[in-house]
Amino acid sequence: MRSDNKLEKQNLREKRKLEQKEEMRTEVISWIRMFVIVIVVVLVATKFIIINAKIPSGSMENTVMTKDRLIGFRFSYWFSDPERGDIVLFSYPVDEKKTYIKRVIGLPGDTVEIRQGKIYINGSDTPLTENYLPEEWYYKNDGFYYEVPEDCYFMMGDNRNNSADSREWADEALAAGVASTAEEAYPYSFVNRKKIKGKAIFTYYRHFHILQHAAVYESN
């Protein structure tokens, strides 16, 4: 009888060990499954829904500061087009492997004239209202005129004195050898609608800041 009891207790201990191993295995599998699901969700979200970007330069200061991290929405333009004043992320026209962030200034079909530190849209006598500029604009602030092609946008940084934007890209295309004449280089001044990745919404590091999307002009 004692032998039977001893054997029964031993069987129970072994059974419990097996059950504990099975529970541990189930828990490990559950954690792995959850980890895989999280990774897949993050990858899908990053590819199709959000843009998580770190800002390497000061071209958008003081709206977006150097080393800020921001979130952009890829779906912002699924059913509508970019508007004047939107802050967008896009493929740099001269080297599409690079992602730039700028503000939309000129829309498809617009004329954009830069005159004495002011921007005039479509021949308006009233310049664009830009309350987001951090300081007086003196670099490349006069004598520029652009006709924005269809399906394209004219982009500028808020920090106009330190921004490689649509004013610069034709020259950069010539310097990079992707264009050999001024005529060939001119289209590089604009961003094609298909190359816009999304709309910047807010910064979350080093501080939280909802981005200002506003640029107003009065048509004649």
Image (cartoon, grey):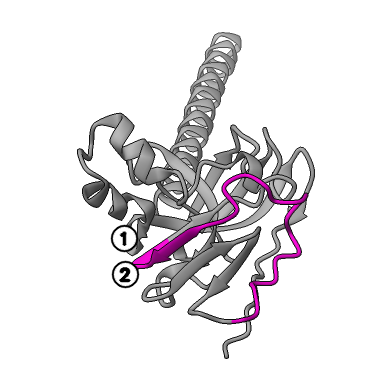
- Pick the residue in front: 150 or 45: 150
Q: Give the range drawn in magenta.
A: 125-153
Instruction: Report how far apart the C-alphas of labels 1 and 2 lie in the structure.
Output: 8 Å
Are the two marked residues, 1 and 2, in contact with CB atoms closer than 8 angstroms?
A: yes
Q: Mark 2 points at which residue?
A: 151
- Pick the residue in front: 196 or 192: 192
Which of the marked residues, 1 or 2, is nearer the chain's N terminus?
2
SS for dot 1:
helix
Q: Which residue is drawn at 76% across and 51% down?
A: 136
Q: Which residue is drawn at 73% across and 55% down?
A: 133
Amino acid type assigned to the residue bearing label 2 in the image: Asp
For the stretch drawn in magenta, what is the main secondary structure?
A: loop
Q: Is residue 208 magenta?
A: no
Q: Is residue 148 magenta?
A: yes
- Pick the residue in front: 153 or 123: 123
Q: Residue at x 42, y 75 (%)?
A: 110
